[in-house]
Structures are given as C-alpha cells and as structure tokens.
Amino acid sequence: MKERRIEHTYDCSAETFWSKIFLDDEYNQKLFLGELHFSEWKVVRSEERAGEVHRVIQATPPLGDLPSAIKRLLSDGLGYEERGVLDRKNQRYRLEVTPRSMASKLTIQGELTTTPISERSCRRIYVARAEARVLGLGGMLEQRLLDDIEKSYNKSATFTNRWIAERKL
C-alpha cells in the first residue's frame, strides 16, 4: 500500500470550508463536471446522523493517457463509488472508494482534514492510500492512482481559491 499526503492553503477559514464549500452542490458540480471534466459526479445518498454526514457519491473521472497495461485492466472504466463520513465536530472526512473495474483488487481510502492558519486561511490536508493487488502491475497502478489524485487535488485547490474569491467567502 502506498500513501500520499497532499496539502493546499485555502483563502478561507476551516469553518467556511466545511460549512459553505465542501458539501455545497453547486461548488461540487462546477468543480467535478466543469473544472475536472468528470463525465459523472452525483450524490446518490446523503444523510445526517448524530453530527456526521454520511454520503455516497458516484463519479467517473476522465480516462486520460494511461499505459496500455493499465487500460486493459480497466474493462469497466474508471467510474467509482465513494462512501464517506464527515465528522462535523472534528472537521474530518473519511472515505473509501470502490472502483467499477477491479473492485476486488484495489483498495482506495482517504482522509481529508483542515488546520486553521488564520481567521481567513486554512490548510487542507488529504492523505490518500492506494493498494493494488495485481501481480507485476500493482506498484505501477498504485503510483498512477496517487499521481492522478494529486493532480486532481492541485487543480481543485486553484479552483477552490478562485471560488472563494469570487463569492467573497
């Protein structure tokens, strides 16, 4: 299993990030469908339970330029289901991803947190973990998954700071 820590600074408080951005449907639609060019991103279920938001998301990121060995493994495409729990009090989102292709051979998990920097800024920290149980290709697949996640988070950080500035959040 490989792990990657991805950090970005946002021009808003941690409270604003969690209450006005993270779960905002308009923000997520524009980020995933518009900015990141997913062909699908939708909340299938979201429910509040004892200070936590439990949600299920279906998403399909763009295929991009993949090595042929990896493309062959993705017979059902890059779509996935994300099951996540936001602990509102501790401002922590934990997620597990089940890919449409190779669900029994891939484990993808993550944890998103924020750390306040000032009244008007916070650091978003995402720790992604990927394990691919594929003989001969596991390490390459894990590396590619984490590289793609990091690229996506880099683009989303730029988009999010623009979103914050435009809305004066």
Image (tube, rainbow, N blue to C red):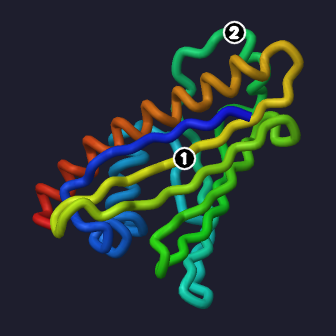
Mark drawn on residue 11: none
Residue at x-position 31% and y-position 73%:
15
Inspect the image, locate mark 2, and give the three-letter code of the amino acid beneath it.
Ser
**Callout 2 environment at 10 Å: few (<14), some (14 to 19), or many (20+)?**
few
Report the side of 83 relative to 135 (left or right).
left
Inspect the image, locate mark 1, and give the three-letter code of the amino acid beneath it.
Val
**Callout 1 environment at 10 Å: few (<14), some (14 to 19), or many (20+)?**
some
Q: Position of residue 12 (x, y in %)?
A: 21, 62
Residue topped by disc 2? 68
Q: Most extreme residue toward the bottom, as rendered?
A: 50
Nearer to the camera, 90 or 56: 90
Residue topped by disc 1? 127
Residue at x-position 78% and y-position 26%:
75
Q: Disc 2 on helix, strand or loop?
A: helix
Q: Disc 1 on helix, strand or loop?
A: strand
Report the side of 5 relative to 128 (left or right).
left
Residue 144: image quadrant is top right
Nearer to the camera, 139 or 169: 139
Q: Position of residue 108 (x, y in %)?
A: 69, 44
Residue at x-position 43% and y-position 31%:
151
Q: Most extreme residue toward the top, as rendered?
A: 68
Sequence-earlier tag: 1 or 2:
2
Q: Position of residue 46 (x, y in %)?
A: 58, 75
Report the side of 101 relative to 24 (left or right).
right
Residue 45: image quadrant is bottom right
The quarter of the picture where the C terminus appears is bottom left
Rendered view: 51 above or below 13: below
Q: Position of residue 38 (x, y in %)?
A: 48, 40
Residue at x-position 82% and y-position 41%:
103
Nearer to the camera, 146 or 20: 146
Q: Compute the Cα span from label 1 to label 2.
A: 28 Å
Rendered view: 32 above or below 131: below
